Amino acid sequence: MGVSVGPGRGSAAGSAVAYCIGITNVDPIAYDLLFERFLNPDRVSLPDIDIDFDDEGRGKIIDWVVNKYGKNQVAQIITYGSMAAKSAIRDTARVLNLPLADADRIAKLIPDISLAKIFGLDDKALKEKLNGDGERVAQAEELKKLSEGRDEIALTINEARVLEGSIRNTGIHACGVIITPDDITNHIPVTTAKDSDLAVTQFDNSVVESAGMLKMDFLGLKTLSIIKDAIKLVKMRHNIDIDPDEIPLDDPKTYELYQKGQTNGTFQFESPGCRSTCAR
């Protein structure tokens, strides 16, 4: 189908079985890689293999899955966005017609912890939670004082405390797709979403797996598109065919680029931290 697939990453790249049946392209025995997925006794969920596709071809793969299994057996996964402290304050203020300046002033008093903690912890515990930062402690204390009044500011704060943590909006999981053995509605509830042609599960990520559904991760990776385009351009201009899996891993010129920190466009080596480490 002309869609690039990544060679494998994460714990799956250490699986000899995945390598032998062609899911991953990295020989774990040659590189002494550990398949650590089963070494952690706390991880009891089924192992899943995240598969990278070039970001332009990811949609094609999902269409292929729908054609293979049927639209009634494939769904994307819903995500739920909850109200954090500051958004609870701003939303409540809007409904109560509190002036924007007052809403901003209250929101700025919240020192990056939840309202439940600000009002639930005693003074000593709150100080510890805020690492003894005097300015943040003072902000939290002012917020508490404002909440004790009888005006609209106090009402806003106390209503926001009730609303904090409740569901505010829904979205679609960036890469998760559910595939079921028969009609999906026999297993879990589904809904529709304006951003998706597919059905969307009404259970989110953690619940959908607890319900026994298999989550497949179809990840779109722009670096795979870059590699695909580069190979096409080399073929067009120089008539040379390149297979990315056959490129040697000990090429000195490649390492020269890494030594200079010139790794823009290289997956997971683009961050300033990775580039400075390479250069050092």
Image (cartoon, helix red, strand yellow):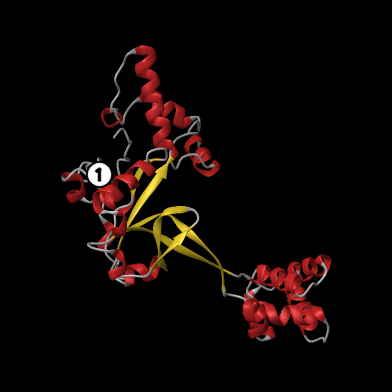
Using the image, determine if residue 226 lies above or below residue 35: above
Left or right position of 175 against 73: right
Q: Which of 166 and 240 is in front in this view?
A: 166
- Residue 209 in percent (x, y) is at 33, 67
Relative height, residue 100 to residue 197 (above, below) = below
Please state which of residues 267 and 137 is positioned toward the viewer in this rendering.
267
Q: Mark 1 points at which residue?
A: 24
- The reply to whether residue 73 is visible in this rendering is yes
Element marked by disc 1: loop
Image quadrant assignment for residue 253 = top left
**Could you tell me residue 98's position as x and y percent?**
80, 72
Quarter of the rendering occupied by the N terminus: top left
Residue 194 image point, x, y percent: 50, 56
At 83% from the left and 83% from the top, the residue drawn is 151
Tell me: 47 left or right of 162: left
Nearest the viewer among 195 and 269 is 195
> Residue 177 at x, y = what percent?
35, 56
- Name the residue located 83 percent from the left edge and 65 percent from the top edge: 101
Task: Tell me which amino acid carries mark 1.
Answer: Thr
Above or below residue 61? Residue 188 is: below
Closer to the camera in the image, 247 or 146:
146
